[in-house]
Amino acid sequence: MIVFELEKLAERPCLAKTWYYVLPPRLLSLLEAEGVTKRFGASLWAEEVELGKLAEQLGAVGFRNGSLVFDRVLVPPPKLQDQGLARRMMEEWRLHDAERATLLKEAQSRLDFERETARGYCGWLFTNPAFRSEFQALQTAMPQLLRPEGEILLPAGPTNSETELRGIRRETMDLSLLEDFCLRWRLNHVVGPRSVMPLGRQEVSPLPSLDAARAQEVGRIAFTPDIARLPPRDELREREEAAIRFTARSAEHLREWINLVESNTLGKKSIARWARIYGLQHYWGVLYERHGTSLNRTGSKVRDAFAQWLEIDRSTLEGDLSQIRRRLGGAFESPRGRSLDWNAGG
């Protein structure tokens, strides 16, 4: 168990006034086993491991000026059967063990489906040159957006627990650029310099970051009262597909992704690959941004460690890296403006 005081994290030089994405402890162990970390300073490596374990314990992806950063797309919450709230709900409903297990399994399957789609979309986004360029331009135009200190900027939303706080922020700041960016790329909000939260299916509360009038531009609002009859399953799906495809006609910049989610044959496999690529490009970028000078001539070992961490063979990993190169070139500008070379390390 790590002993720590969260309020003192901002005093650490590596966390003060900056964003710090952690590397997963299992990936760190694999990198160490491959001998990749031999040239890392002992204290630097110990801190990397400590912060990675701390973030994993708390379900965080990193730190912002010492404060925890959470991203349920990059690091999903625990399975439903491991969540105390879900267990208590099952107990209150007085379900038999078999009924409880079936219900949790079905609910988890739906959640996993949605999360894989969101993760895949993020993988597609962060290897999309147009998105990266516009994301960088947004940060240039709104330097306060990802400033480690100060307020977290969120698009305006309908009434909820954050409405009053968001309203106060909007009184002193024009967030139209952020809202337009989120609208164009179908985002709930920007999490950090390397992560965003895509819009997800919300049948009753349509869009948490956009008002209902603008929601029609990016999707479909659905409301079904509990006294209504539902149409047959196929008819309901056809109606929803028709409504969604109507808004997609004007989203040519999203055409490649929309074609994937429309496909019943190629889509599932491709989306799973994009979900994997999201983690690969994120943690590869974090590793080389923080330790690039110590990774010369370790490229093959780094690849072996990542392949083991992703539980794929080396050829599949090389294919994923090639896909990223084809979309972004041999080198690309990270959201923080540093050049990261996918061929780094030899």
Image (cartoon, rainbow, N blue to C red):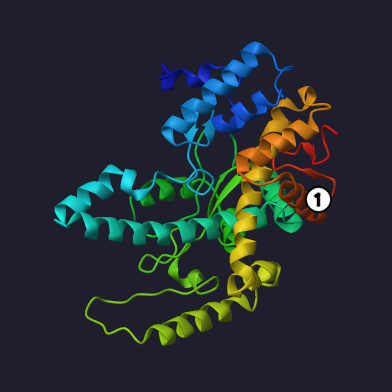
| Above or below: residue 190 compared with residue 256 | above
Q: Residue at x 55, y 52 (%)?
A: 175
Quadrant assignment, res 159: bottom left
Q: Which residue is drawn at 46% across and 17% down?
A: 8
| Above or below: residue 293 compared with residue 114 | above
Read off the residue under disc 1. 325
Quarter of the N terminus within the rendering: top left
Hey, which residue is sitting farthest top in the picture? 42
Indicate the secondary structure of the residue bearing disc 1. helix
* Residue closer to the observer: 76 or 79: 79
Q: Residues within 10 Å of mark 1 (few under 14, many from 20)?
A: some
Q: Which residue is drawn at 26% across and 82% down?
A: 228
Give percent across and percent down for residue 52: 54, 27
Give percent across and percent down for residue 297: 84, 27
Give percent across and percent down for residue 143: 65, 41
| Above or below: residue 37 compared with residue 180 | above
Quarter of the C terminus within the rendering: top right
Q: Can residue 17 be seen in this view?
A: yes
Give percent across and percent down for residue 210: 48, 62
